[in-house]
């Protein structure tokens, strides 16, 4: 199975082709985002409705990681 | 059995709340009549900008006095009011507007309002998401932002709110469901854009506005940014208009306005008007196009022909006060309005002359 290499908060990670960004974040063990009051949040619905898995991808904030296919060289940043 | 009050106020928006707070502080027994949530009308719809405005001498006096009252109150405000002393940046697009910056600065110097002239380079450094090539700005550092519904709730602490609709109002009291009279020594109509339904014939019209809030982008905007051409837009009393207005919220969200319409009476979001407003915002801040919006909404300002609120007793009934017609400045001018109403009731000399805001004044229509 072919692998895609990307980074999450500067940490290199490989995921199987066809995976979403949320898989890569989960593999690194990062918190996806934090609420206004600082609570950790993560993928709840996995289908792009709840907006709880938002991360910054290649500088673009608030991307729903469960809806974006991982791509080679992507730089993903999360709230922690 | 209905208790008797010194003052009964129809309307639990920020203006009614400020009137209630000032009357209670004067030792009066106060009740507020509000069927909906406190601060749920124009108070919730507005931007919550505390700003000194210079459209007319009376507007300067009222906004300046009221901003002082907010500044004196700021340490008492709970965190949920989100008082943010971010200042207003009046953005000048070209050299003609820079001349306006200088005029505005001289005027503000004359009334003791701190300002700083901001050069093209300084503006680009302070607000890097503004488009390049803007001429500069006038910074008014003591202007601020609040979250108005929570400010209204704070002002009403300890004051009874009757969850009922006011069906009629006169100097004798407020009529409630079933014809019940809530008797009071003085009544106040503070129902904003709906005030003419209770007090027919007053010159208050609904002026619709659209707003949009983005997701959280901390630091994207750090001051309230308003195009200097704003007054031209806000001033016209006839045509629909839009102006660039961007505001940082404590959550990191960006609140975007503004639009003005007469004659549109329903609350629906009008895509062409919203699009026109956002195009104007994008002209000043191209990067806004890449931000995610989370919500848009509309609200109705209570507009008067001379752009000044109606504050004081109505002619013919000295016990019925009006406190409405604040248009887009109700959050700023609420506290001064409360003081003017309480001063009138108590027979005290107000801090600023009350004449320009009295309901019986001679009104000269702008433009």
Image: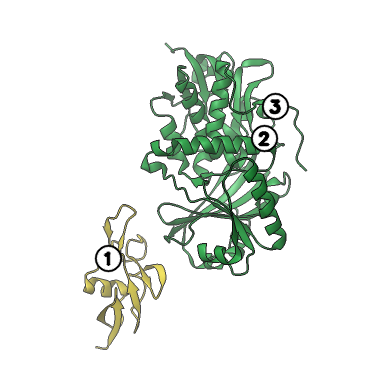
Chain colours: A yellow, B green
Q: How much space separates mark 2 and mark 3, taking CA atoms?
A: 23 Å
Question: Which residue is at a point 57% across and 30% down the rendered structure image?
Answer: B337
Q: Chain of mark 3?
A: B
Residue B184, given in percent of the width and then of the height, sits at 52, 14
Which residue does the numbered mark 3 point to in the structure image?
A: B201
Mark linked to residue A80: 1
Residue B327, given in percent of the width and then of the height, sits at 62, 39
Q: How much space separates mark 3 and mark 1, taking CA atoms?
A: 59 Å
Residue B123, given in percent of the width and then of the height, sits at 56, 63
Question: Which residue is at a point 31% across and 68% down the rendered structure image?
Answer: A78
Q: How much space separates mark 1 and mark 2, taking CA atoms?
A: 51 Å
The picture quadrant where one finds residue A73 is bottom left
Q: Is residue A9 above or below residue B177?
A: below
The picture quadrant where one finds residue B362 is top right
Q: Chain of mark 2?
A: B
Which residue does the numbered mark 2 point to in the structure image?
A: B58
Q: Name the element at disc 1.
A: loop
Q: Is residue B185 above or below residue B308?
A: above
Q: Chain of mark 1?
A: A
**Quarter of the image with the N terminus of chain A in it:** bottom left
């Amino acid at each position: 199975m072919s692998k895609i290499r990307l980074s999450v908060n500067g940490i290199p990670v490989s995921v199987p082709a066809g995976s979403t960004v949320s898989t890569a974040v989960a593999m690194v063990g990062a918190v996806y985002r934090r609420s206004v009051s600082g609570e950790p949040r993560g993928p709840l619905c996995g289908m792009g409705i709840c907006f709880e898995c938002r991360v910054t991808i290649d500088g673009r904030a608030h991307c729903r990681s469960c809806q974006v296919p991982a791509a080679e060289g992507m730089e993903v940043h999360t709230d922690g | 059995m209905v208790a008797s009050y010194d003052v009964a106020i129809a309307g639990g928006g920020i203006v009614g709340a400020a009137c209630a707070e000032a009357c209670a502080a004067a030792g009066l027994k106060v009740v507020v009549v509000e069927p909906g949530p406190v601060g749920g009308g124009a108070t919730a719809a507005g931007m919550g900008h505390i700003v000194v405005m210079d459209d007319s001498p009376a507007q300067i006096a009222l906004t300046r006095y009221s901003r002082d009252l907010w500044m004196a109150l700021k340490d008492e405000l709970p965190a949920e009011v989100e008082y943010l002393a971010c200042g207003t940046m009046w953005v000048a697009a070209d050299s003609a507007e820079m001349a306006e910056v200088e005029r505005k600065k001289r005027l503000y110097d004359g009334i003791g309002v701190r300002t700083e002239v901001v050069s093209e380079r300084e503006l680009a450094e302070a607000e890097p998401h503004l488009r390049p090539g803007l001429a500069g700005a006038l910074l008014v550092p003591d202007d601020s932002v609040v979250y108005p519904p929570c400010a209204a709730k704070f002002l009403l602490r300890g004051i009874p709110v009757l969850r009922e609709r006011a069906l009629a109002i006169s100097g004798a009291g407020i009529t409630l469901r079933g014809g019940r009279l809530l008797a009071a020594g003085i009544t106040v109509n503070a129902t904003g854009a709906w005030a003419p339904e209770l007090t027919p014939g007053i010159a208050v019209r609904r002026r619709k506005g659209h707003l949009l809030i983005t997701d959280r982008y901390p630091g994207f905007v750090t001051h309230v940014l308003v195009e200097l051409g704003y007054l031209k837009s806000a001033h016209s009393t006839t045509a629909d208009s839009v102006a660039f207005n961007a505001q940082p919220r404590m959550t990191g969200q960006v609140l975007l306005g503004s639009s003005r319409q007469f004659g549109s009476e329903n609350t629906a979001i009008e895509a062409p008007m919203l699009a026109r407003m956002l195009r104007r915002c994008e002209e000043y801040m191209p990067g806004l196009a890449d931000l995610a919006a989370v919500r848009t909404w509309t609200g109705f300002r209570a507009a008067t022909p001379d752009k000044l609120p109606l504050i004081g007793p109505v002619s013919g009934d000295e016990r019925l006060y009006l406190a409405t017609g604040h248009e887009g400045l109700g959050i700023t001018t609420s506290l001064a309005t409360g003081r003017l109403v309480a001063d009138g009731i108590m027979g005290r000399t107000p801090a600023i002359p009350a004449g320009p805001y009295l309901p019986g004044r001679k009104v000269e229509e702008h433009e």
